[in-house]
Every structure is written in structure tokens, then in C-alpha cells.
Amino acid sequence: MKAFLITYKPATENPELGWPIEELRRLVKTTQAGQRAIEPWRFRNLKDVKIGDRVFLLLQGKSGPAIIGYGEIAGRHENNSGDWFVPVEFETIVDPTVECLADRDAVRSIEGGDRFWRIMSSGVKLPDSVADELEALVVGTSPKPRNEGFISNPDWERDELIVALNFYLQHRPSPPGKNSREIRDLSDAIKRIGEKLHPGLDPSATFRNENGVYMKLMNFRSLDPSYTSEGKTGLPRGSNTDKEVWDEFAV
């Protein structure tokens, strides 16, 4: 089964191409009522689209990237004023001002997915590896509440980064999988450190969780010449402190 990424940006951020939040909430209410929520969505490429293919809805803009819905292709495409639209039936869709299925940290932890989270088009086919990780991450999971629209975890502190880097160097350039016991143990250790470094923090469910910790390891991998010399990139967009810690300790 193939999988496609469709995108949503609030009309408040992009009046010309965005979609009103009220329209999205209409779909949310429909699914909550146990009814079929079908909406035509603009697709970039129709070559491989078939009924039953998986679809993931990506929130873009200031509050993204985050996954806020998934479903499947529910019918044949139609042309509307020169644009092709495909009916999508949502199995689950949530109000992004309140909750999400996978937040920014979780989405960015997916290896190979970074170039898709910033894509300008909707209806883009996903590689199997990215689609499989997205499916494992969101399908069948409960929505996660968000504070004031979205949870924002504090930036990583130097001590947290040193612990993560030490783990990375012990396993370079290919750390254990993010669902492994080793990553869970690393997450638990960094959570304990982080809670002391961020006094008064009311930690969210995503604070230094396995997804976020694994993503940080992938940030380090993007700095590792033993990995990048093969023409690979790792996960970019780490912080300046990531590089400072790498330069100091990765000898």
C-alpha cells in the first residue's frame, strides 16, 4: 500500500492558499460523531494514486510540522479549475489548536522525512521507510493535548547534550533503533537530568522522550564525518550548542 502526504496551513497564516480552521473543525466533528468525513484534497501527482492508499495530514506553518490526521483515498480524482483534487476519507482528524497525533519532535525524528515537512505541494508520495514510521507513530494512537495550542519543550542544555553525545559516540554512526531498550534507557536518564536543569518545568509527554532523544542523535550524526563522508546527511537543523558540544568532545 502506498502512502501520501497532504498538507494543511491555517488561512490566518496564508489567506490565499490556507484553509479556515472552521472547515477543519467541521471534519473533526464529523469523525467524532461516528460519520464518514470525506474531503477533496489537492494532489500534486496522480500517477500512483489508488483507492485505499494511506494518507497522512501534515500541519504546516508556525505550529508545525505535526501530524493531525490520517485516512485513505476514497474515490477517483476530479479536476477543479485546473487543479486536481482527490477525495480523502479521514479515519482520525484532530483540531490542531488543541491536540495532535504526532508533534514537532516526533515528526522530525523520522529519518529521511525532513525534506517532506517543508514541502510546498500537497499529495506527495512518501518513501516506504518514512510512511512505515509515520504509520507506527500515529495510527491507532490517542490524540495528545497541547498547551495554548502547542507544547513547546525547552531547548537542550549542554549537560543533556553531553550525555546524548557520549551515547552516540559509543554507537557511531548507527545508534540503536528508537524503539530499543537502549534508547528508552537514554531517554529516562536525560529526562532526570533535564528536570533538574529546568526547575519548575511541568514536563509534557514529549519531554526528552524516545522520539526527541533519537532525533538529537540524528542531529549529531549530521555532524559526524564518518557518516557524512559517505554522502549522507543525517538530520540537519540541530542547534549551535549541538555543534559546540560535538567540536569539544567528539575527538
Image (cartoon, rainbow, N blue to C red):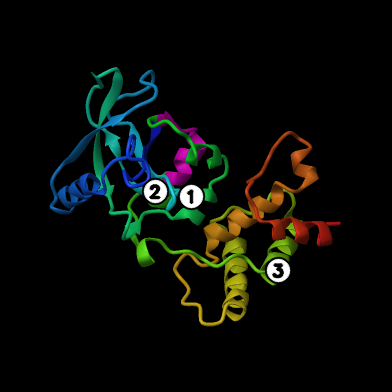
**Depth order, front residue of 21/91:** 21
In screen coordinates, is 18 left or right of 248? left
Which of pointers 2 and 3 lies earlier in the amino acid sequence?
2
Residue 198 is covered by the magenta coloring: no
Question: Label 2 vs label 1: CA separation?
Answer: 7 Å
Residue at 29% x, 41% y is 19
Estimate the x, y position of residue 24 in percent, counting from the top left: 24, 46
Indicate which label's residue lies in the foreground, 2 or 3: 3
> Residue 107 has which mark?
1
Residue at 60% x, 81% y is 196
> Residue 67 has which mark?
2
Q: Decide if residue 210 is in sight here.
A: yes
Estimate the x, y position of residue 134 in percent, counting from the top left: 44, 45
Q: Are marks 1 and 3 in contact (CB under 8 Å)?
A: no
Provide the residue span drawn in magenta: 124-134
Amino acid of disc 3: Arg
> Residue 158 has which mark?
3
Estimate the x, y position of residue 17 in percent, counting from the top left: 34, 35
Estimate the x, y position of residue 64 in percent, counting from the top left: 44, 50
Amino acid of disc 1: Val
Q: Are marks 2 and 1 in contact (CB under 8 Å)?
A: yes
Residue 126 is covered by the magenta coloring: yes
Q: Decide if residue 142 is in sight here.
A: no
